[in-house]
Image: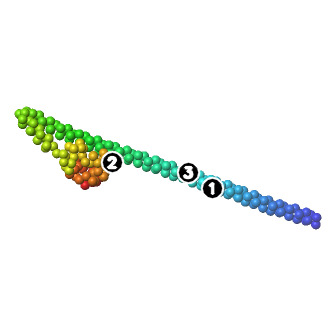
Amino acid sequence: MNKAYIASVISLSILLVGCGNQSSSKTNTSSSKAKSESIAKKNSIKRASSIALAKQKSSESKAKKDNDSKAQSMSIASSESASSKLAYSQSVSSANAAYSSSVSAKSAQSSSASQASSTSSSSSATQSNSSSISHDTNTLTGFLNTYGKSPVAYKIDHGMSEKEALETTPDTMKTSGEIQYGYMTYGIK
């Protein structure tokens, strides 16, 4: 009996030790699984937050680039507008100067032609040339002779915008360049 008792105690203890090892290994395995899952979750959270942060930085830099490009294009547009206004006023001024010099040249020619004739007819011809120069401000020629510039240029010089001046001036009081410029720039017909 002793032998059988000892054999049963030994087999029972081996059995219990084996079960204990299995349960502790299961516990170790499950705790290591839990730890690895926890680490995996932390890593995935870190990855997700770093991806979200990278996307946010990317969208912020894209928005900044868009804002910078919009500001630059607005700056370019305003400088182009200012340069076109300057070019327009310079072209109007040069056209007015050319017209004034042509009028002066014609009157000088008329004056020299009248001096070639007799002295008495010379004074009467000069008086008739002076009276033939129109100063009627209701015509383009008269306006140019009186003010030295077209009505559109006069309005712009006195505070009206380019577009308003072109719109409010009738075509009969505009130079051909002003008519073309108004049509090409603002679509004024």
Q: Is 17 displayed left or right of 80 in the figure?
A: right
- The image shows residue 19, relative to residue 159, as above or below, that is below
Instruction: Give, as a three-letter code, the residue at label 2.
Output: Gly
Q: Earlier in the sequence, mark 2 or mark 1?
A: 1
- The image shows residue 129, relative to residue 31, as above or below, that is above
The x, y position of residue 165, in whole percent, is: 29, 51
In what element is the residue under mark 3? helix
For disc 1, the marked residue is 45
In what element is the residue under mark 1? helix
Tell me, for residue 22, which label it has, or none: none
Q: Quadrant of the N terminus?
A: bottom right
In this view, the residue in front, 141 or 162, is 141
CA–CA distance between discs 1 and 3? 14 Å
The x, y position of residue 85, in whole percent, is: 32, 45
Q: Residues within 10 Å of mark 3 (few under 14, many from 20)?
A: few
Residue ranking furthest to the bottom: 1
Q: Residue visible at 25% across and 52% down?
A: 169
Q: Residues within 10 Å of mark 2 (few under 14, many from 20)?
A: few
For disc 3, the marked residue is 54
In this view, the residue in front, 44 or 3, is 44
Tell me, for residue 159, which label it has, or none: 2
The x, y position of residue 174, in whole percent, is: 23, 49
Q: Quadrant of the C terminus?
A: bottom left
Q: Residues within 10 Å of mark 1 (few under 14, many from 20)?
A: few
CA–CA distance between discs 3 and 2? 52 Å
In what element is the residue under mark 2? loop
Q: Earlier in the sequence, mark 1 or mark 3?
A: 1
Disc 3 or disc 2, which is closer to the eye? 2
Instruction: Give, as a three-letter code, the residue at label 1.
Output: Ile
The x, y position of residue 141, in whole percent, is: 19, 46
